[in-house]
Image (spheres, rainbow, N blue to C red):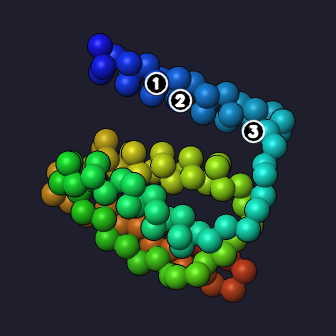
């Protein structure tokens, strides 16, 4: 029952994401832009995923430049990074590295998974 409930919650989350993507494609989604410490956000998300990564024997390797500040919608960006990390967990082979890099070059920021 617990597993079924967890899967139902995950399905609900995926459906909500699908509707958000549809709204975004129709340009009715509202972005709530704020100043974000992207370096901190990525580090915190990795901390949250550490037990899940460890369980799958995946090893995060990071090169995140400290102090990267951006303007963006923190919730939407967190959803993107959450999805990328979940994909890494679900589709990586055990005993492999998961690389997360972020750096700023002038007015641009590059984040790679």
Q: Residue placed farthest to the bottom in the image? A: 106
Using a 10 Å C-alpha cutoff, classify the residue at mark 2 as few (fewer than 14 neighbours), some (14 to 19) or many (20 or more): few
Marks 3/2 in contact by CB < 8 Å: the verdict is no
Helix, strand or loop for disc 1: helix
Count the marks: how many? 3
- N-terminal of the pair, mark 1 or mark 3, is 1
**Residue positioned 18% across, 54% down in the render:** 57
Query: Residue 13's mark?
Result: 2
- Vertical side of 18 occupied by 92: above or below: below
Residue 40 lies, in percent from the top left, at 53, 70
Q: Is residue 46 left or right of residue 24?
A: left
Q: Is residue 32 left or right of residue 40?
A: right
Residue 113 appears in the figure: no
The residue labelled by disc 3 is: 24
**Residue positioned 69% across, 86% down in the render:** 106
The residues tagged by marks 1 and 2 sit, at their Cα atoms, a distance apart of 6 Å
Helix, strand or loop for disc 2: helix
- N-terminal of the pair, mark 3 or mark 2, is 2
Residue 62 lies, in percent from the top left, at 37, 73
Using a 10 Å C-alpha cutoff, classify the residue at mark 3 as few (fewer than 14 neighbours), some (14 to 19) or many (20 or more): few
- Vertical side of 8 occupied by 79: above or below: below
The residues tagged by marks 3 and 2 sit, at their Cα atoms, a distance apart of 16 Å
Query: Residue 20's mark?
Result: none
Residue 27 appears in the figure: yes
Q: Which quadrant holds the C terminus?
A: bottom left
The residue labelled by disc 1 is: 9
**Residue positioned 38% across, 18% down in the render:** 5
Helix, strand or loop for disc 3: helix
- Vertical side of 58 occupied by 104: above or below: below
């Amino acid at each position: 029952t617990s597993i079924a409930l967890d899967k139902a919650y995950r399905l609900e989350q995926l459906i909500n994401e699908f509707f958000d993507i549809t709204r975004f494609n129709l340009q009715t989604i509202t972005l709530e832009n704020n100043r974000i410490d992207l370096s901190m956000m990525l580090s915190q998300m990795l901390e949250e995923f550490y037990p899940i990564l460890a369980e799958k024997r995946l090893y995060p390797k990071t090169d995140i430049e400290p102090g990267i500040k951006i303007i963006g919608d923190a919730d939407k960006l967190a959803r993107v990074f959450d999805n990328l990390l979940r994909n890494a967990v679900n589709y990586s082979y055990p005993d492999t590295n998961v690389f997360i890099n972020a750096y700023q070059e002038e007015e641009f920021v590059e984040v790679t998974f």
